[in-house]
Amino acid sequence: MPTYDYRCQACDHRFEQFQSMTADPLRKCPQCGKNKLERLIGTGAGVIFKGSGFYQTDYRSDSYRAGEKAADAPKGGCSPACGTDAAPAGCQMPKKKS
């Protein structure tokens, strides 16, 4: 349930009220008793997903994903043949046992 901001047009009293979205707006000021309340439009709050199934990595930028792939790539200019008899000169990967 959201919290709404109210302001009385008669006495300028301001307050917050925790209400259901389907509830009618308040009209009577709790301070002066006049029917001059108006519901103010606020900025609201950001949506925060909590619980299982929501991960901060689900919505990463493309540049972040590209950097992550580059970090996972083999180091030292190795090729897919590294670790085999066809490995290029200078490959430091141990040869795979067959």
Image (tube, rainbow, N blue to C red):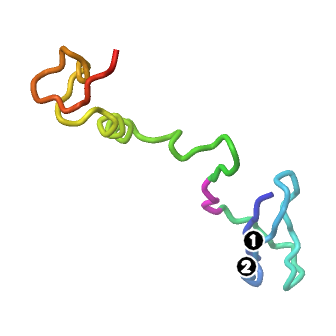
The picture places residue 5, in percent across and down from the top left corner, at 72, 69
Quarter residue 65 falls in: top left
Q: Secondary structure at mark 2?
A: strand
Quarter residue 42 falls in: bottom right
Q: Vertical placement of 18 versus 64: above or below?
A: below
Q: Which residues are magenta?
A: 42-46
The residue drawn where x is 37% and y is 41% is 64
Q: Nearer the viewer, residue 7 or 70?
A: 70
The residue drawn where x is 68% and y is 51% is 50
Q: CA distance from mark 1 to mark 2?
A: 6 Å
Q: Vertical placement of 84 versus 18: above or below?
A: above
Crowd around label 2: few <14 · some 14–19 · many ≥20 (10 Å): some
Q: Quadrant of the C terminus?
A: top left
Q: Nearer the viewer, residue 76 or 11?
A: 76
**Which residue is disc 1 drawn over?**
6
Question: Is residue 88 rendered magenta in the image?
Answer: no
**Which residue is disc 2 drawn over?**
14
Residue 89 located left or right of residue 71: left
Q: Nearer the viewer, residue 20 or 24?
A: 20
Q: Are marks 1 and 2 in contact (CB under 8 Å)?
A: yes
The residue drawn where x is 80% and y is 57% is 1
